[in-house]
Image (cartoon, rainbow, N blue to C red):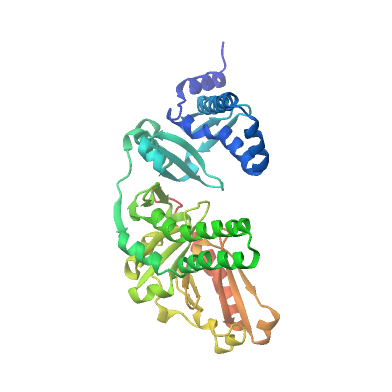
Amino acid sequence: MTTPGVDDAVHEKEAVTERRLHPITPLRRAWAPVAVVIGWAVHDPDQAQRQLTRLTTTTLLTALAVVVAAAALYGFLTWWFTHFAVTDTELRIRTGLLFRRTAHIRLERIQAIDVTQPLLARVAGVAKLRLDVVGTDKKDELAFLGEREARALRAELLARAAGFAPETAHEVGEAPARELMRTPPRDLALSVALTGATWMSLLAALVVPPLLWWATESLWTVLATAVPLLGAAGASSVGRFVTEYDWTVGESPDGLRIDHGLLDRSHETVPPGRVQTVRIVEPLLWRRRGWVRVELDVAGSSNSVLVPVAPREVAEAVVARVLPGVVVPPPSALVRPPRRAGRCVPVWWRGHGLAVTDAVFASRQGLLRRSLALVPHAKVQSVRLVQGPWERLWRIAEVHVDTGANKTVTARLRDAQEAAELLRAQAERSRTGRRGARPDRWMV
């Protein structure tokens, strides 16, 4: 005689089929023992050099063989003890050699699944899945799967998260996408060249090391400073071009899809219901061409760029797909602070502006690099009025709007009475806005 609960548990265990990652995965994980040896050598290079000089050729080859064998064994064992399975309600990921870890990811809490392919993964025909789950800061991942298997698993998980029955979810396939915009490589390269941060990084990399050599005549000091500066300059120029190359934004039932990358290819999904803030950035040297950059604050996600560079009208059309019913306020609709705000922030006070519509709280700041932040009323978590002693003297105040992405948008240098009225009105708009808020996913 058996109990029904035990029978159900046994039946579920038999029904769940655990799967392993792609056989190439051990190569990715085999670097851990090698990294330990390299870390020891870098930490104490003098000691490492002395130890190497004492070793004979035979001993050195034997040690190298041991390290390679240990790395291969470690990579194989971590792959062998890693499994994943999809049940009717969750995705389970089991990992760990000595300390076992099992992640139970509820399917209905999955917001988005990104597919990333580093350069070597593209050559090998494999991909990595990164899962964006509600309530978690760190993304769980499956690395690596075959490219076709990764896309099929992504489509199945999103279909199940959308409410499709388990027996039909694997037949749904990937939702179709409609392309909204694509960034031409020429425009991207020119936008990088016209960005002030790029030139500042290059200038620092060219000027600071010679000055340090003139002051200290220490090669190590110059190298310790020059290498990070050159890295920052490369990241802000070549690195940005490589990362944002062939940037494509498409619209699908599960959100906005973003594909980009020259060497490492990424396929990301932005769940529109979790977008807390949209920022339209307009650097000084871009204005003559009418270009802007669109950035995002997404709750529980690291996605931060929606459009790297595009004409303003194209960018605003994409913003309208993220925030349905929202019209970006034109510059003429933004109300400047009172002139006495110049006593608090000379000259730069002219770059601030504010507009509150039926849909969003819009605040602009910056004189050379303008940034217009749009916060839907439904996404406002709290509103605060802040006023320092110097601001009280000139009857100036700030209104801080906190969002669900742990970020704050500030309307600075507002008239004190205006700020007090804005505080009360915004609290009411937030309450009414949440009643008619859209779901966190388009698919539901």
**What residue occupies the far top of the structure in this picture?**
1
* Figure label count: 0
**What residue occupies the far right of the structure in this picture?**
389
Q: In the rendering, at what x and y percent does residue 111 appear?
A: 46, 47
Q: Is residue 5 above or below residue 184?
A: above
Q: Is residue 320 visible?
A: no
Q: Is residue 430 visible?
A: yes
Q: In the rendering, at what x and y percent does residue 294 appear?
A: 42, 64
Q: Residue at x 33, y 41 (%)?
A: 174
Q: Is residue 193 above or below residue 353?
A: above
- Name the one closer to the observer, 301 or 59: 59
Q: Residue at x 56, y 34 (%)?
A: 34
Q: Residue at x 39, y 51 (%)?
A: 442
Is residue 136 shown left or right of residue 303? Answer: right
Q: In the rendering, at what x and y percent does residue 156 appear?
A: 38, 36
- Image quadrant holding the N terminus, namely top right
Q: In the rendering, at what x and y percent does residue 23 appear?
A: 43, 27
